[in-house]
Image (cartoon, rainbow, N blue to C red):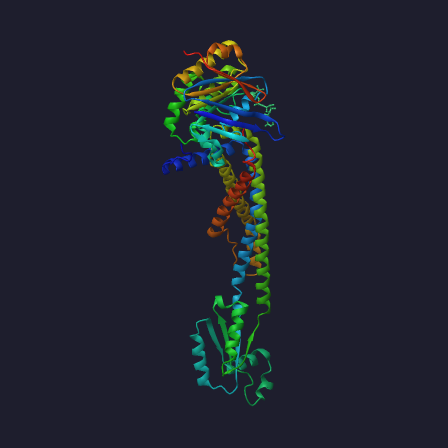
């Protein structure tokens, strides 16, 4: 006689999984306090990196409005004439990486300077306009990073008409560096707390296995396979993780909601219109899927380590 | 059905629970296993249910060499060997029905089929009216009958019982034995370990006697 699993129909298989999933949920529901405590620990652990990620996204979004700061000023040579200037302006206007090209006419600039500075008389003494023609160039958003803007600068420096190009990148560069460090930091914290969630779920499942030792022994005695015995514990882990994820979502949403008022007031003081954006759909899906998988994986580790220790005698 | 060839079981520490045992049980036979405490009765039954593996020799059940059964196939072997224990081994947080249904649930039977078979099995042991009860509310004899119903519900060809009447009075013990005889009459092979020599001799079945891990006597049953 050959031993081995009999072939189940797929609908029977699905039905069995559904039954185990629901009965595992029911078991957790019947011990609400213990379940809630585990879920809360997982939720807090996951809320931290999630909240930081959302905060960082908001800061980056806020900084998106400053990306015009990566502006290039092309100072043209004195000998370049009107026709060449118009040609260059048109050429740059068609450049695929640029959003806007603005021509600063030296005569208009001089007039404005005279009007604003009050040096009217003194400037009149000059025999010719000392100001150069300047093109103010704003790259498209995706070419506003320090690296891309610098590349554009070298490109423009090579143009025959250009005397020199100026790019004030210092603070843009600093800001990008800081957000990059913060992003890494969030990632490291996320990984560490993800590991913590694995340990929490693993330990909880380990205790459950100990509590249900005699049930496991008896199930093995009557011919329950390892997969059969494992299944309810795996679903428990999955539910722990998922409920922790949902709790993290709630915690972050409530925190954002509480911060929104003060931040709006602050933005108002700076005459800025800034709205805190909540967790987006993508982040939420990652959070819920990730938490469920962490729970499943944590329980998998515990089950793998402790289930084979229990043998009937 | 059950073959033991030069079977020795040495426990860690060197003690031999069973030494060089040779016998075989034909299909449909009912055999009693006796011997003093520590003689090796439980050891012998545990080898058949693959709760232990033998150190030397060969155990064959239904033509299957148990040494060749891989760990992951043990559950499928156990589904063909019903086991009954002195301490019943029932789950106390589940009803009588759910306890008896367990072997069918692990085997993945359909819901209706499980209900039908559990009822038939409970009916046979006379506990149909207690299906919604919890084991703690039952007497020792009733709990033992729940254990028996669970062991036979999936209709295994072999049933092992380790001191099934250990805690019961003579009358209840006799009832349990009658139950075993009924199973035997429908072709189940039974191996029953017991101290109750009076009961055993009254039954008139084959008796294997163990002493210090060795098979001392093999008395054939009276033809009935
Ligand atoms: N897991 C074990 N490790 C070491 N020795 C064991 C183990 N199980 C049983 N033994 C020893 O093997 C011998 C046989 O034990 P077994 O349980 O088979 O006896 P038994 O005939 O069933 O006795 P009883 O009538 O008391 O149940 C005993 O001396 C016992 O001490
Ligand atoms: Mg014993």
Q: Quadrant of residue B1?
A: top left
Which image quadrant: the N terminus of chain A?
top left
Q: Tell me which residue sits at (49%, 81%) in the image.
A: A159
Q: Position of residue A252 (x, y in %)?
A: 54, 48
- The answer to whether residue B92 is visible is no
A195 or B151, nearer to the observer: B151
Residue B175 pos. (x, y %)? 46, 12
Q: Is residue B109 above or below residue A262?
A: above
Location of residue A38 by image quarter: top right
| In the rendered image, the vertical position of residue B44 relative to residue A281, given as above or below | above
Name of the residue lying farthest toward the right: B13
Q: Residue at x 54, y 51 (%)?
A: A260
- Relative placement, left or right, of A313 versus B130 is right
Q: How many numbered callouts?
A: 0
**Residue B19, position in %: x, y?**
56, 25
Q: Residue shown at 58%/57% (left/top)?
A: A184
Q: At x 39% / y 30%, what residue is drawn?
A: B109
Could you tell me residue A261's position as x and y percent? 55, 51
Looking at the image, which is closer to me, B212 or B129?
B212
A15 horizontally vs A153: left or right:
left
């Amino acid at each position: 006689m050959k031993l081995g699993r009999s072939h189940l129909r797929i609908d029977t298989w699905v039905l069995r999984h559904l039954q185990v999933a629901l009965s595992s949920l029911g078991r957790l529901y019947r011990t609400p306090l213990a379940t809630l405590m585990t879920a809360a620990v997982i939720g807090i652990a996951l809320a931290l990196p999630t909240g930081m990620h959302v905060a960082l996204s908001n800061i980056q979004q806020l900084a998106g409005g400053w990306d015009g700061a990566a502006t290039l000023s092309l100072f043209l040579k004195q000998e370049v004439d009107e026709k060449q200037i118009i040609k260059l302006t048109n050429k740059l206007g068609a450049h695929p990486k640029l959003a806007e090209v603005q021509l600063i006419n030296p005569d208009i600039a001089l007039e404005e300077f005279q009007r604003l500075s009050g040096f009217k008389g003194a400037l009149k003494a000059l025999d010719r306009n000392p100001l150069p023609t300047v093109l103010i160039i704003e790259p498209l958003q995706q070419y506003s990073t320090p690296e891309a803007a610098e590349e554009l600068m070298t490109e423009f420096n090579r143009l025959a008409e250009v005397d020199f190009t100026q790019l004030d990148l210092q603070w843009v560069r600093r800001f990008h560096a800081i957000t990059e460090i913060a992003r890494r930091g969030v990632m490291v914290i996320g990984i560490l707390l993800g590991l913590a969630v694995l340990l929490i779920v693993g330990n909880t499942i380990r205790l459950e296995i100990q509590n249900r030792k005699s049930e496991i022994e008896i199930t093995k005695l009557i011919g329950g396979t390892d997969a059969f015995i494992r299944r309810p514990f795996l679903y428990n882990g999955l539910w722990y993780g998922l409920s922790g994820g949902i709790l993290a979502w709630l915690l972050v949403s409530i925190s954002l909601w509480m911060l929104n008022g003060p931040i709006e007031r602050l933005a108002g003081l700076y005459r800025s219109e800034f709205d805190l954006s909540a967790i987006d759909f993508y982040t939420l899906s990652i959070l819920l899927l990730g938490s469920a998988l962490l729970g499943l994986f944590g329980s998998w580790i515990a089950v793998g380590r402790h289930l084979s220790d229990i043998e009937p005698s | 059905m059950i073959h033991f060839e030069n079977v020795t079981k040495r426990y860690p520490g060197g003690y031999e629970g069973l030494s060089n045992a040779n016998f075989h049980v034909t299909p449909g036979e009912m055999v009693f296993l006796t011997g003093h405490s520590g003689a090796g009765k439980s050891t012998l039954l545990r080898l058949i249910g693959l709760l232990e593996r033998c150190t030397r020799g060969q155990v064959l059940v239904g033509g299957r060499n148990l040494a060749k059964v891989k760990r992951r196939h043990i559950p499928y072997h156990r589904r063909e060997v019903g086991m009954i224990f002195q301490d019943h081994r029932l789950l106390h947080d589940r009803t009588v029905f759910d306890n008896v249904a367990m072997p069918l649930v692990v085997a993945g039977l359909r819901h209706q089929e499980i209900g039908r078979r559990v009822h038939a099995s409970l009916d046979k042991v006379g506990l149909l009216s207690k299906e919604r009860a919890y084991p703690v509310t039952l007497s020792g004899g009733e709990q033992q009958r729940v254990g028996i119903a669970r062991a036979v519900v999936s209709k295994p060809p072999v049933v092992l019982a380790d001191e099934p009447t250990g805690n019961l009075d003579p009358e209840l013990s006799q009832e349990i034995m009658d139950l075993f005889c009924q199973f035997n009459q429908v072709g189940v092979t039974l191996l029953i370990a017991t101290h109750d020599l009076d009961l055993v001799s009254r039954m008139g079945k084959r008796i294997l006697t163990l002493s210090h891990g060795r098979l001392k006597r093999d008395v054939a049953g009276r033809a009935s």
